[in-house]
Amino acid sequence: MRNSQRRVAEFLDDEDLHAPPAYRLLDLSAEVGELAADATASSGYGSDPDALSVQRDELGDALFALLALADELDIDAAAALEESIAKYEARIDDGGAPGSGE
Ligand SMILES: [Mg+2]
């Protein structure tokens, strides 16, 4: 993850594509929306969940946007991921579900 975040940061530097975090968050939302569009189209709006698929490049776009947001916020994405996994493990160990709404 650290290498990926560094790769995104270098790309943003090299191509002079830095942007305010608010823009990066909007871009991330748009890319996640494209994943949702893939999912709704492939599954017939959920009527055939087994047919659900998303395009690999769209997943890459969303990951790029997330790592670009982390870079603009000066957040170590790998550390943030480890913190989340530890949080989910603690919830499961406490007998619950990993999600916060369960
Ligand atoms: Mg896209």
Image (cartoon, grey):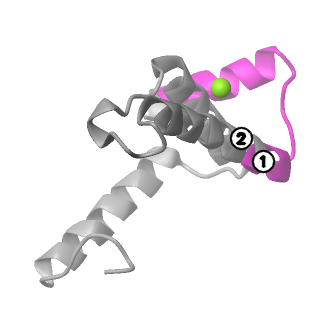
Residue shown at 60%/52% (left/top)?
75
- 52 to the left or right of 91: right
Q: Is residue 39 above or below residue 25?
A: above
Residue 29 visible in image = yes
Quarter of the picture containing the N terminus is top left
Q: Amino acid at mark 1?
A: Leu
Q: Assess whether mark 2 and mark 1 are in contact (beta carbons under 8 angstroms).
A: yes
Label of residue 30 in the image: 2
- 84 to the left or right of 8: left
Quarter of the picture containing the C terminus is bottom left
Q: Is residue 63 magenta?
A: no
x and y, in percent, of residue 79 in the image: 43, 52
x and y, in percent, of residue 38 in the image: 53, 31
Q: Is mark 2 within 8 Å of ligand 1?
A: yes
Q: Which residue is mark 1?
A: 26
10 Å crowding of disc 1: few (<14), some (14-19), many (20+): few
Residue shown at 50%/29% (left/top)?
59
Residue shown at 44%/29% (left/top)?
42
SS assignment at label 2 = helix
Q: Amino acid at mark 2?
A: Ala
Q: Main secondary structure of the magenta part?
A: helix
94 and 76: which is toward the camera: 94
In front of the other: label 1 or label 2? 2
57 and 44: which is toward the camera: 44
- 10 to the left or right of 37: right
Residue shown at 20%/68% (left/top)?
89
Magenta extent: 4-25
Residue 66 visible in image = no
